[in-house]
Image: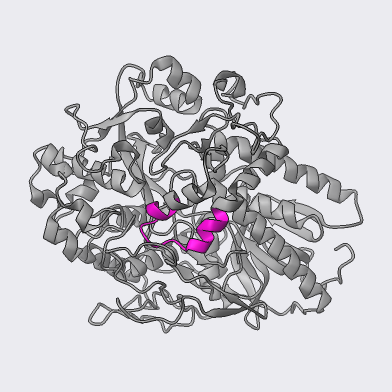
Amino acid sequence: MGAHEQLPTDLPPTDLRPTDLLVIGSGIAGLTAALHAARSVDVLLVTKADLAEGSTRYAQGGIAGAVDPSDTAAEHEQDTLAAGAGLCDAEAVRVLCDEGPATIADLIDRGVAFDRAGDLESAGGLDAAGDLEPADGLGSGIGAGRSPYALGLEGAHSRPRILHAGGDATGRAIEEVLVDAVRDRATESSSSATGGSLALREHTALVDLLVDGGRVVGAELMAADGTRLAVRARATLLATGGAGQLFSHSTNPSVSTGDGIAAAWRAGAAVEDLEFYQFHPTALAAPGSFLISEAVRGEGAVLRDEHGRRFLPALDPRAELAPRDVVARAIAQVMAAQDGRPVLLDATGIGADQLRERFPTIDAAVRGAGVDWGSEPVPVTPAAHYWMGGIRTDLDGRTTLPGLLAAGECARTGVHGANRLASNSLLEGAVFGARAGATAMEQARAAASAALPVAAAALPVAAAALPVAGTALPAAGTALPIAGTALPIAGTALPIAPRGAGCAASPYTALPAHHAPVDAAAPAGSDPRPGSSPGPVPGASERWTRAELQELLWSHAGLLRTGDQLDAAAAQLSSWQDPDPSSCTTVAELEDRNLLHLARLLIGHALARPGSVGAHHRLDDPRHLATQGPADTQGPAEARGRTDAHELVGAPTSALSADSEPAQEALAC
């Protein structure tokens, strides 16, 4: 452990060597955090699959940043706040946008070859073997004259500011560079006895966090063969991504099961904004829900109903470049009106050659599905894509539990509010991953200086008596003294910026600025909503499958929701048996446990917010019912006078009423 004081080593034979910092997850946030911290402390990076596997690898759209001299961080900030529907943390958005250009420059300096303006062919694509072809001679180029990079336009951005690599393989390009850097650092560490170090452990899953005296002191893990392991750490950082596997239709890879969010909640950390799950508007309407990037619409593609008519210009002046929640809901409505058949993404105006050059990965996937998108439209449907909510953190990744930090999609930084702006996720992972890594490094140093004990007797949270659901949420309208309060994290008062500060008030906000932290010690079966059905019963014994859970969430808590649907889902989930963590012998069993806990939490949060805002759309919102039109991020005043999608295709208003479910069923194709 370098020059730091050694942690206790009187551990069982299956325990791993103690470390200064334990990082769990290997996407852009986890890799960035590990690289920053390993400069001066010992880091163990754990991931449940291959180091390069995760959502970062599949990110097509790009990374947003005000890198062109004609653009400003303030403009990027305003676009982010507008997309977030009034629920962003203004200070978090400012940090993201101000630090974005330098963060992107750092990625370039590490070797990420972003596409250059007017030279897409030389800047990338995939070679015959399917590997990225980097461009030569790329310096940072940021801040000097005109940006040399090809800046794309995506939904809800006021100007082109999206950098891509390999056309539509941005996440892959970033992941490969960071993975190489981490492997190189790990190799250096094995031959160095001074300074910090970095060790890797792949195919090792998180079971639960180790908690002692209210402080996280490491984690219980499971190896690929089912062996249980434990590692003690002065600081633990979760970067485990989202939970797209909650839904039957998702653009996320199979590893996206929300492991870190579930474990943090079981340990007692506050989670927030779990009702806000973003559904990407355009996934290929075929098995696998392959994502067709928003950048395609940024290049000029349009959406049409099955009769070839565009429907978005009549709904929103931004048309195909409106925020994702607006576009996705419009597609759902049109699909409901045409008996569930997909809408059509028409990219023929871009041209076959340009599509192949600009979007090589998408081009191969679409053509592989039998569609010549240079001459015919592509059938598309919305699919679960990104969780805006997660583990509540401050601007430096600290959670409400001492010793625990979080970054990336598993963290609720407040950047995204109720709806994420396109291509801000990679930027958030890099910006806040670096901040969390630096903070974790300092925490580990401080803990070592204070000779902070990490008790060998600390038990994994799985051994504690935990509530089955944990949905201790406030009744709507309850005043909660949370925003702006000081949180005792690692002995330091850390103010959390009041949510919504500097943001326009949302007309659909029906809850106070913050939910109460979900209390892991809440009595089993507690339910804060007066008159509602009781929560899950500890003795629930009904068996279930992951496919059943995914279909339940898709049909009852997906893109369009009602209170009745959510209540029905809550009742069903309460009857399902919790997997016993002590008897889990496979990663899949651990994942199922996490998905069940997260499904209950998502439903609880959605029930606690009766109003529609951003990605959380309630068909039974009184304002929605009053106008009989889709509520969007602009509020009722903007919605009045617009044509609704169902009117364009001759659908009866009742097709989207709160008493029926055809709109959600329409998406299950």
Q: Is residue 94 magenta?
A: yes
> Which image quadrant for residue 164?
top right
Measuring from the top left, give residue 213's x and y in whole percent.
65, 83
- In this view, the residue in front, 22 or 491, is 491
> Can residue 94 be spotted in the picture?
yes
**Magenta residues?**
80-96
Q: Is residue 199 above or below residue 357?
A: below
Horizontal side, residue 213 vs residue 583: left or right: right
Q: Is residue 177 above or below residue 633?
A: above
In the picture, the quarter occupied by the C terminus is top left
Horizontal side, residue 239 vs residue 198: left or right: left
Horizontal side, residue 500 vs residue 335: left or right: right
Measuring from the top left, give residue 50's x and y in whole percent.
64, 44
Q: Main secondary structure of the magenta part?
A: helix
> Can residue 412 be spotted in the picture?
no
Horizontal side, residue 383 vs residue 179: left or right: left
- In this view, the residue in front, 139 or 654, is 139
Count of number-bearing discs: 0
Measuring from the top left, give residue 254's x and y in whole percent.
49, 46
- In this view, the residue in front, 163 or 146, is 146
Q: Is residue 263 magenta?
A: no
- In this view, the residue in front, 244 or 60, is 60
Measuring from the top left, give residue 651's x and y in whole percent.
10, 42
> Which image quadrant for residue 624?
bottom left
User: At 55% across and 54% down in the image, what residue appears?
Assistant: 96
User: At 43% across and 64% down in the image, what residue appears?
Assistant: 502
User: At 44% across and 61% down in the image, what residue appears?
Assistant: 88
In the picture, the quarter occupied by the N terminus is bottom right
> Which image quadrant for residue 548?
bottom left
